[in-house]
Amino acid sequence: EEQLVESGGGMVDSGGSLTLSCAASGFNFAQSWMYWLRQAPGKGLEWVSTINRSGGSIDYADSVKGRFTVSKDNAENTLYLQMNSLKTEDSAVYYCATSPRRDRGVWGQGTQVTVSS
């Protein structure tokens, strides 16, 4: 079974840091482009970051550029999102996925990040 499981979410003060992990199983993670997306309460899904198969090509949304760092450990089948200088507007459920489309690919169940002022 293809599966993604996020972890590492929680509550943090504004300016703090969190690292999210996404454990992959049941598919060829090393050959997969991976995505982080988030959804805040009452808002639509927002793309956060993309990383290619090898991790050599990375892109970020302007809203997180310079503060978030995505990485991919193909040996451990794990995707990471290091989040620094967190803001209240970063509060959301964070998802890792093999496709940026909700109706495609493999999606995790999401992990809640709450940033308090």
Image (cartoon, rainbow, N blue to C red):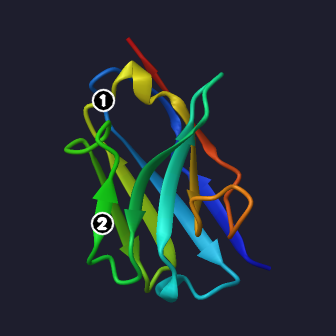
Q: Quadrant of residue 14?
A: top left
Please state which of residues 66 and 101 is positioned toward the viewer in this rendering: 101
Q: Which residue is mark 1?
A: 16
- Going by the image, does 94 lie left or right of 103? left
The image quadrant where one finds the N terminus is bottom right
Question: Percent position (x, y) of residue 82?
Answer: 34, 50
The tag earlier along the polypeptide, 1 or 2, is 1
Name which residue lies at 35% across and 83% down. Answer: 54
Name which residue lies at 52% across and 49% down. Answer: 37
The image quadrant where one finds the C terminus is top left
The vertical placement of 100 against 52, above or below, is above
Amino acid type shown at disc 1: Gly
Res 58 label = 2
Gap in angstroms between the C-alphas marked 1 and 2: 23 Å
Name which residue lies at 55% across and 32% down. Answer: 92
Name which residue lies at 64% across and 47% down. Answer: 110
